[in-house]
Amino acid sequence: MMKCTKIDLPQQRSIKTPTGNKSKRSEGCGCAGIFSRLDNSLPCSSPSKMAMRFGNLPAWASEISDSIRELVLLNDPGLDPMNSGTYYGAEEECAFPSDLLWREPLFDQLIVNAYQPGEGICAHVDLMRFEDGIAIVSLESSCVMHFTKVGQPHCDAANGGKSHPPTTRIPVYMTPGSLVLISGEARYSWKHEINRKPGFQIWEGQELNQRRRISGLYFI
């Protein structure tokens, strides 16, 4: 069973941590703050509009990583924020497996990309050198990410990036400020792609208006 989790980022955050302290509300940790920080991380002179950090993340990126953990705690009633590693419910229903959620650091690698309208990513599984548990923060433009089972041919780079209809294709609608968590079978046995060419970004029968999109990917 393929399972990934999508969470909408709030404008502010406030949650009790395992230490018992309550986080202050901060615009910098919400959607607007995350956008400005990811956007500012992109090199202005680079035509590829990509930035990568591996190892020790800068303070602002570590703060976003902490926000991801807190958002999972806010949105999954089965998790106990005061007792790390405890899950009250079926483990397969957990938004992010508890063994991944409480690892330290949660993430220590970050890749930020900026995509113009029409630019996307072909179907792929993220590199095996990254561990299980990946977070994707999507900002500025709505898009549909599709998941297809590994072994199903889908994106044909030799044919202009055109897609072939797979047997199973699962769409995930990502509005600006969406957080997508991928782990387990969804991480290793399913490919994900965002085809932003004309005619492919369809949701509920309507083609989405494409703008520049910023994507922040967290790994460890």
Image: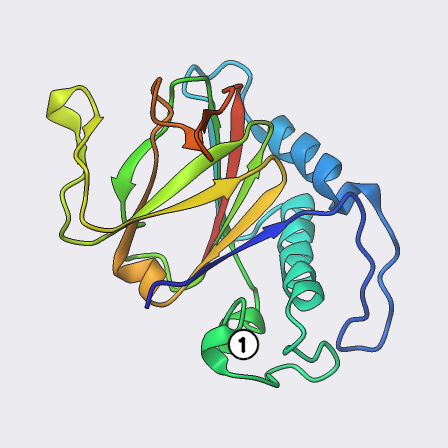
What is the crowding at mark 1: few (fewer than 14 residues within 10 Å), some, or many (at least 20)?
some
Q: How is the image coloured?
A: rainbow
Which secondary structure, mark 1? Answer: helix
Q: Quadrant of the N terminus?
A: bottom left
Quarter of the image for residue 86 reads bottom right
Q: Quadrant of the C terminus?
A: bottom left
The image position of residue 155, as x and y in percent, is 20, 34
Q: Residue at x 71, y 40 (%)?
A: 31
**Is 2 on the left-hand or right-hand side of 22?**
left
The relative height of residue 123 versus residue 214 in the rendered view (above or below) is: below
Farthest residue to the front: give it. Answer: 205
Q: Residue at x 52, y 68 (%)?
A: 96
The image position of residue 91, as x and y in percent, is 49, 81
Q: Which amino acid, mark 1?
A: Ser
Of residues 136 and 93, the one drawn nearer to the viewer in this rendering: 93
- Count of numbered circles in the view: 1
Quarter of the image for residue 47 reads top left
Quarter of the image for residue 83 reads bottom right
The image position of residue 52, as x and y in percent, is 47, 38
The relative height of residue 80 versus residue 189 in the rendered view (above or below) is: below
On the image, numbered disc 1 is attached to which residue? 98
Q: Residue at x 41, y 63 (%)?
A: 3
The relative height of residue 46 versus residue 10 in the rendered view (above or below) is: above
Of residues 107 and 191, the one drawn nearer to the viewer in this rendering: 191
The relative height of residue 124 versus residue 95 in the rendered view (above or below) is: above
**Is 179 on the left-hand or right-hand side of 28?**
left
**Is 217 on the left-hand or right-hand side of 73?**
left
The image position of residue 141, as x and y in percent, is 56, 27
Q: Residue at x 72, y 76 (%)?
A: 81
